[in-house]
Image (spheres, grey):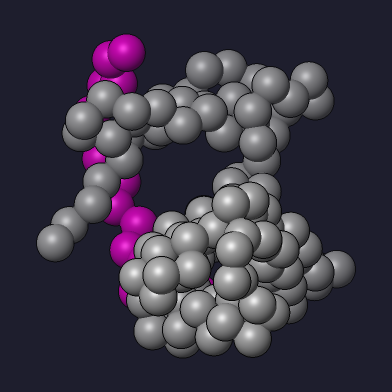
Amino acid sequence: MNKSLNITWLGEQRYVGVNPSGQQLLIDNSPTKIGVSPMDALLGALATCTAVDVVDIMAKKRTPLRAYRIEVVGERAETHPKRYTHITVRHIASGDGVTAEALGKAAHLSHEKYCSVAASLNSEIIVEAVVEDTPVSV
Protein backbone atom coordinates (compact mmCIF):
# COMPACT_ATOMS: atom_id res chain seq x y z
CA MET A 1 0.00 0.00 0.00
CA ASN A 2 1.44 3.36 -1.02
CA LYS A 3 0.81 6.63 0.81
CA SER A 4 1.39 10.06 -0.65
CA LEU A 5 1.41 13.69 0.40
CA ASN A 6 1.87 16.67 -1.89
CA ILE A 7 3.75 19.55 -0.25
CA THR A 8 3.34 23.13 -1.46
CA TRP A 9 5.53 26.02 -0.33
CA LEU A 10 3.46 28.91 1.05
CA GLY A 11 6.33 31.38 1.49
CA GLU A 12 8.92 31.96 4.21
CA GLN A 13 9.51 28.45 5.57
CA ARG A 14 5.83 27.46 5.64
CA TYR A 15 4.40 24.48 3.77
CA VAL A 16 1.07 22.72 3.43
CA GLY A 17 0.84 19.01 2.78
CA VAL A 18 -2.30 17.59 1.19
CA ASN A 19 -3.08 13.90 0.94
CA PRO A 20 -5.19 12.36 -1.87
CA SER A 21 -8.35 12.66 0.30
CA GLY A 22 -7.80 16.41 0.72
CA GLN A 23 -6.78 16.49 4.40
CA GLN A 24 -4.14 19.11 5.12
CA LEU A 25 -1.10 19.35 7.35
CA LEU A 26 0.60 22.69 8.05
CA ILE A 27 4.35 22.44 8.58
CA ASP A 28 6.04 25.68 9.57
CA ASN A 29 9.69 26.42 10.22
CA SER A 30 9.41 30.18 9.73
CA PRO A 31 10.26 32.72 12.45
CA THR A 32 6.55 33.41 13.09
CA LYS A 33 5.27 29.86 13.39
CA ILE A 34 1.59 29.11 12.90
CA GLY A 35 2.15 25.37 12.41
CA VAL A 36 4.49 22.75 13.79
CA SER A 37 8.08 22.26 12.70
CA PRO A 38 9.03 19.20 10.65
CA MET A 39 10.75 17.62 13.67
CA ASP A 40 7.72 18.33 15.91
CA ALA A 41 5.52 16.72 13.25
CA LEU A 42 7.69 13.60 13.43
CA LEU A 43 7.24 13.42 17.21
CA GLY A 44 3.50 13.96 16.75
CA ALA A 45 3.30 11.22 14.14
CA LEU A 46 5.02 8.76 16.47
CA ALA A 47 2.86 9.70 19.46
CA THR A 48 -0.45 9.57 17.62
CA CYS A 49 0.44 6.35 15.81
CA THR A 50 1.07 4.57 19.11
CA ALA A 51 -1.94 6.27 20.74
CA VAL A 52 -4.28 4.79 18.14
CA ASP A 53 -2.89 1.33 18.91
CA VAL A 54 -3.00 1.73 22.69
CA VAL A 55 -6.61 2.96 22.69
CA ASP A 56 -7.64 -0.02 20.52
CA ILE A 57 -5.66 -2.57 22.53
CA MET A 58 -7.06 -1.36 25.85
CA ALA A 59 -10.63 -1.38 24.47
CA LYS A 60 -10.16 -4.95 23.19
CA LYS A 61 -8.96 -5.97 26.65
CA ARG A 62 -12.20 -4.54 28.04
CA THR A 63 -10.39 -1.78 29.93
CA PRO A 64 -11.25 1.26 27.82
CA LEU A 65 -9.44 4.47 28.62
CA ARG A 66 -11.38 7.38 30.10
CA ALA A 67 -8.52 9.87 29.78
CA TYR A 68 -5.26 9.50 27.89
CA ARG A 69 -2.37 11.66 26.85
CA ILE A 70 1.13 11.15 25.60
CA GLU A 71 4.16 13.25 26.43
CA VAL A 72 6.85 12.79 23.80
CA VAL A 73 10.35 14.23 24.13
CA GLY A 74 13.02 13.98 21.47
CA GLU A 75 16.72 14.53 22.08
CA ARG A 76 18.56 15.79 19.01
CA ALA A 77 22.16 15.60 17.94
CA GLU A 78 24.02 18.90 18.06
CA THR A 79 25.57 18.52 14.60
CA HIS A 80 23.83 18.34 11.24
CA PRO A 81 21.56 16.71 10.29
CA LYS A 82 20.52 17.11 13.97
CA ARG A 83 18.52 13.89 13.92
CA TYR A 84 16.74 12.52 16.93
CA THR A 85 19.09 10.33 18.91
CA HIS A 86 16.61 9.36 21.62
CA ILE A 87 12.84 9.66 21.89
CA THR A 88 10.88 9.10 25.10
CA VAL A 89 7.16 8.39 24.74
CA ARG A 90 5.38 8.65 28.10
CA HIS A 91 1.84 7.20 28.20
CA ILE A 92 -0.46 8.61 30.89
CA ALA A 93 -3.96 7.16 31.16
CA SER A 94 -6.84 6.38 33.47
CA GLY A 95 -10.06 4.43 33.35
CA ASP A 96 -11.93 1.71 35.20
CA GLY A 97 -9.61 -1.25 35.63
CA VAL A 98 -6.70 0.46 33.84
CA THR A 99 -3.40 -0.42 35.52
CA ALA A 100 0.12 0.76 34.80
CA GLU A 101 1.01 -2.85 33.93
CA ALA A 102 -1.81 -3.19 31.36
CA LEU A 103 -1.05 0.21 29.86
CA GLY A 104 2.64 -0.68 29.67
CA LYS A 105 1.89 -3.94 27.87
CA ALA A 106 -0.33 -2.12 25.36
CA ALA A 107 2.31 0.57 24.79
CA HIS A 108 5.06 -2.02 24.36
CA LEU A 109 2.93 -4.02 21.91
CA SER A 110 2.31 -0.87 19.89
CA HIS A 111 5.94 0.21 19.80
CA GLU A 112 7.29 -3.27 19.06
CA LYS A 113 4.63 -4.67 16.70
CA TYR A 114 1.91 -2.35 15.40
CA CYS A 115 3.03 1.28 15.13
CA SER A 116 4.26 1.83 11.58
CA VAL A 117 5.89 5.15 12.50
CA ALA A 118 7.97 3.51 15.25
CA ALA A 119 8.92 0.71 12.86
CA SER A 120 9.91 3.27 10.23
CA LEU A 121 12.12 5.11 12.72
CA ASN A 122 13.81 1.82 13.64
CA SER A 123 14.59 0.71 10.11
CA GLU A 124 16.75 1.56 7.17
CA ILE A 125 14.54 3.53 4.80
CA ILE A 126 15.54 4.12 1.23
CA VAL A 127 14.85 7.78 0.47
CA GLU A 128 15.06 8.57 -3.21
CA ALA A 129 15.32 12.23 -4.29
CA VAL A 130 13.92 12.83 -7.75
CA VAL A 131 14.16 16.25 -9.40
CA GLU A 132 11.80 17.21 -12.20
CA ASP A 133 12.55 20.07 -14.56
CA THR A 134 8.90 21.06 -14.84
CA PRO A 135 7.34 24.45 -14.14
CA VAL A 136 5.42 24.45 -10.87
CA SER A 137 1.82 25.57 -10.87
CA VAL A 138 -0.07 26.26 -7.68
- The furthest residue to the top: 138
Left or right: residue 2 versus residue 36 is left
Q: Is 128 located above or below residue 104 in the figure?
A: above
Q: Is 43 located above or below residue 8 in the figure?
A: below
Report the span colored magenta.
120-138
- The furthest residue to the front: 96
Q: State how many labels appear.
A: 0
Which residue sits at x=31%, y=46%?
A: 131
| Residue 93 picture location, percent across and down | 67, 62
Left or right: residue 128 versus residue 2 is right
| Residue 102 picture location, percent across and down | 57, 82
Q: Nearer the viewer, residue 91 or 30?
A: 91
Which residue sits at x=64%, y=86%?
A: 101
Q: Nearer the viewer, residue 90 or 130?
A: 90
Quadrant that contains the C terminus: top left
| Residue 41 picture location, percent across and down | 58, 47
Q: Nearer the viewer, residue 9 or 39?
A: 39
Left or right: residue 74 versus residue 114 is right
Please check the rendered image and state whether residue 15 is part of the magenta-colored stretch, yes or no.
no
- The furthest residue to the left: 1
Which residue sits at x=41%, y=70%?
A: 62
| Residue 92 picture location, percent across and down | 71, 63
Which residue sits at x=14%, y=62%?
A: 1
Q: Main secondary structure of the magenta part?
A: loop
Residue 20 quadrant = top left
Q: Is 137 located above or below residue 13 in the figure?
A: above
Residue 80, visible in the rendered structure: no
Residue 86, visible in the rendered structure: yes
